[in-house]
Amino acid sequence: MIEIDIQKSFKNQNERINFNFKTSIEQGSLSALFGKSGSGKTTLLRLLSGLETPDCGQISVAGKIWFDSNKKINLSPQKRDVGFVFQDYALFPNMSVIENLRFAQNEKNEDFLEEILEIVELKEFKNKMPASLSGGQKQRTALARAVARKPKLLLLDEALSALDNTMRKNLQDNIEKIHKRFNMTTLMISHDIAEVYKLASKVIMIDNGAILKEGNPDILFESSKISGKFKFSAKILKIQKADTIYIVTLLIGDNLTKVVATQSEIEKMNIGDVVLVASKAFNPIIIT
Amino acid sequence: MFFETMLLTFKLAITTTIILFIIGVPIALWISTTKLKIKPIIETIVSMPLVLPPTVIGFYLLIFLGPNSAIGGFVETYFDTRLVLSYEGILIGSVIFSFPFMIHPLQSGLQSLPKSLVEASYTLGKSKFQTLLHVQLPNIRSSLLTGLVLTFAHTVGEFGVVLMIGGNIPGQTRVASLAIYDEVEGLNYDVANQYALTLFAISFFVLLIVYSVNKKYSGVLR
């Protein structure tokens, strides 16, 4: 179990922002931090990794105290045993892919490195320098490096935000595989509902420096009382009027679909919104 | 005489560069990361040798390191070394006078590195020293080279400080730049030209190496 109960206040240019996080995360789970930019997601990861120090509170991971303001315990980032994937990758430019990974290990274990490289499909690139890698390859190297020391807690800071759809899917698969294989407790920041649904067993919604709500990914939708048999997150691409009804064009994954909506339903929709598409009481046909 | 003077000149320049590198890296690291309010004061002190006439620095060093001063007297009593009109004296003067030439490139190099590189190294369990050695210094190679070479070249070319604190003692404190002045005074233009041409050639090739190598490094790291 990872127990977090911390406060921190920052002084911005003209205002004071107070962060207040209290939650617990199950060992071996993959949780997603979801929220607007500037809501404090990255700050939470930095507080957990020891790169920032909370004003007060406690952090304990698997029974070990990482931070406790009452007992004056504050482990340095070096002693916390985290893997941190930075938004800008932060690969060391003077080291090749494999050297980046080796640098991360306290005890040398080449077999383990080979296994990780296999999972993130970077075997043939292991002797390349970071400057010669593509964005997706850099990102996978950063993920592999964070995993290389077998951390107790893996933190992914908007790991997928800079990637296009195909590379994103690829990295999602890598994250899933790594999580399944090594069972590392993982906390990832994501803006993408589909991604959260696919990877996470728990969502922590953050707004304005505090946890708004948390639970299984269904909470992303306010009114998700529907027990639909088929449920997808979709993005509204187009709303067209057709006689008295409206046709809404939706993007689900890589597929386009059209759904009928009424005038009153349309009023709550905007192009670009991410919504939940659900259907129940129908018989899907499976074509093989 | 010529070789003795040249040897002294390079001994001084190399020793100054080594000393400044050893004390310059921690100071540049401190300046580049500190959030203390006294940072501008420290930066000003580091930059002072750039704007002060060398004679001003030489004059104060003469006052504060002389045998009758507290520091000079202490060193002379307990270490049996005189800090003025001696090699040790011009070494201290050179270190102080070339200070900004080592600190500035190192500082700007360290500041230009993304903060996340250092943070990544910390989260990977590496200490500050390991991070400096394996992450920071190797990634500011061109700044390192610039600092080393500028310090070296600047020490070879200095005149005022060495003259003030070292006098002009052959074999002890007479470096090439002083020798040129001496020989011209004595109307020995040939010997003066020998020194001048040597300094000219060395400076040219040293700077040429810096610019060529820097171009290569920037190609690797960008």
Image (cartoon, rainbow, N blue to C red):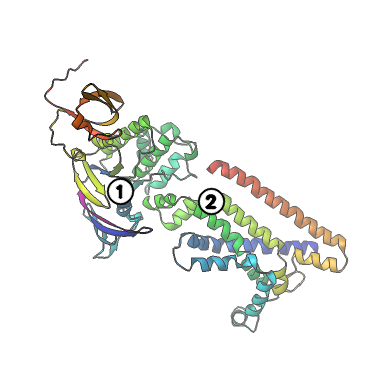
Residue A282: which quarter of the image?
A: top left
Helix, strand or loop under label 1? helix
Magenta residues span A14-24
User: Disc 2 marks which residue?
Assistant: B140
Figure check: A4 above or below A93: below
Element type where label 2 sits in the image: helix
Badge 2 amino acid: Ile
Spot occupied by residue A248 in the image (x, y as percentages of width and height): 25, 26
- Left-right relation of A66 to B103: left
How many numbered marks, from 0 up?
A: 2
- Of residues B170 and B165, the one nearer the viewer is B165
Q: Residue furthest bottom?
A: B68
Label 1 and label 2: CA atoms lie apart by 32 Å
* Mark 2 neighbour class, 10 Å CA radius: few under 14, some 14 to 19, many 20 or more: many
Q: Quadrant of the N terminus of chain B?
A: bottom right
Q: Nearer the viewer, mark 1 or mark 2?
A: 1
Does the segment drawn in magenta span residue A20?
yes
**Which residue of the protein is positioned furthest toward the top in this rendering?**
A288
Is residue A2 visible in the rendered image? The answer is no
Task: Give how far across and how far down residue B111 sits, in percent.
Answer: 50, 55
- Seen from the viewer's position, the closer of residues A103 and A50 is A50
Which residue is identified by label 1?
A41
Q: Residue at x 79, y 60 (%)?
A: B195
State the image coordinates of residue B207 (x, y, percent, origin top left). 68, 51
Residue pushed farthest right? B187
The chain letter for the residue carrying disc 2 is B
Residue sticking out furthest to the front: A243
